[in-house]
Image (cartoon, rainbow, N blue to C red):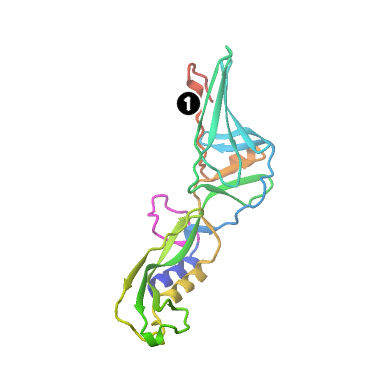
Amino acid sequence: MLILFASLLHALAAPTSEPDADAASDEVDLADWEPVTLAEGALDLAGEVWLKTDRGCRLANVFDGELTVPLCETPTLTCTWSKHLGNAWSSEGSHRCERADGGGFGGGSAGSFHDLPLRVVSSEDRVVWRRVVRIQAVTMTHFQEVHPCTEATRDVRSPDVADGKRTCRWSEGVQVQIRPEQTALGVGIASRVFDEPIDCHQPCPARGDIAEVLAMNAAIGPEPRARRGAARIEIFRTKPECEASPWPTEVTLPWKVCTRGTEPSME
């Protein structure tokens, strides 16, 4: 336990470094996770912008919270992709293609509500969505023991005594966990019920690892965190700012729709 806590404090003071993308998800090194502040309120973005995509920076437009990105424009086919912008960036989006002969086609993708990139605080000329997690220490195993009280002590006033029974709860083991910001942790309890009455004047034994959990969480801090150097979603006011961004992007657009029935070039 002390070794794990010492390692956590060392991670807090360690110099920052680029994370290993293939590192196991259960390896918690706080040097790889930087605190972030989640954005609040409406997204103040409109007009021409530059979206960083898997094919570089693309000129786009935002109107009434709707982002529209041209995918291709040729003499025979014009395709666009659009999605609604919010504090969470879901996989929901749709494309629409118009042929010069008057025909057209479209489609879309369903939204996801788990492990979404969330909008973080950024400048007026740059909006960023990142995958955000909570890092926290929790007790690994939860127990409770229930004993009936003796007839003489069944009415004892105690937070552990109710309905003539004493219930003692405690936890053992400490684990540092990473979870997506929008996912809750589940807690399981191993319970034992005894038949032999006990003197319920006696308090529950003091045991467990609550003190270690509190100390570790104080060292971690309450802020949500994002992995350093990880892919993110970025929208910029200008193309030079977009092209200067060093981060990989999560945005992959449906470019293949531009080859349905014709062969327009994207480049």
Q: Position of residue 225 (x, y in %)?
A: 52, 57
Image position of 40 (left or right of 116): right
Residue 99, compared with residue 83, is above or below; it is above
Q: Position of residue 122 (x, y in %)?
A: 64, 50
* Residue located beneath label 1 in the image: 256
Residue drawn at the location 56% of the way across and 49% of the way down: 118
Overall secondary structure of the magenta stretch?
loop
Residue 107, compared with residue 261, is above or below; it is below
Q: Position of residue 261 (x, y in %)?
A: 48, 16
Image position of 212 (left or right of 234): left
Q: Is residue 140 visible?
A: yes
Which residue is at the far left? 195
Q: Amino acid at mark 1?
A: Lys
Toward the viewer: 124 or 172? 172
Residue drawn at the location 32% of the way across and 72% of the way down: 192
Which element is circle 1 on? Answer: helix
Q: Where, quadrant-wise, is the N terminus in this rendering?
A: bottom left
Assess disc 1: are there few (<14), some (14-19) or many (≥20) residues with their C-alpha within 10 Å of its C-alpha.
few
Q: Where, quadrant-wise, is the C terminus in this rendering?
A: top right
- Membership of 36 in magenta stretch: no
Which residue is at the far front? 151
Q: Is residue 208 visible?
A: no
Toward the viewer: 44 or 123? 44
- Membership of 26 in magenta stretch: yes
Question: Which range is magenta?
Answer: 16-30
Residue 183, compared with residue 73, is above or below; it is below
Q: Quadrant of residue 37?
A: bottom right
Toward the viewer: 1 or 51? 1
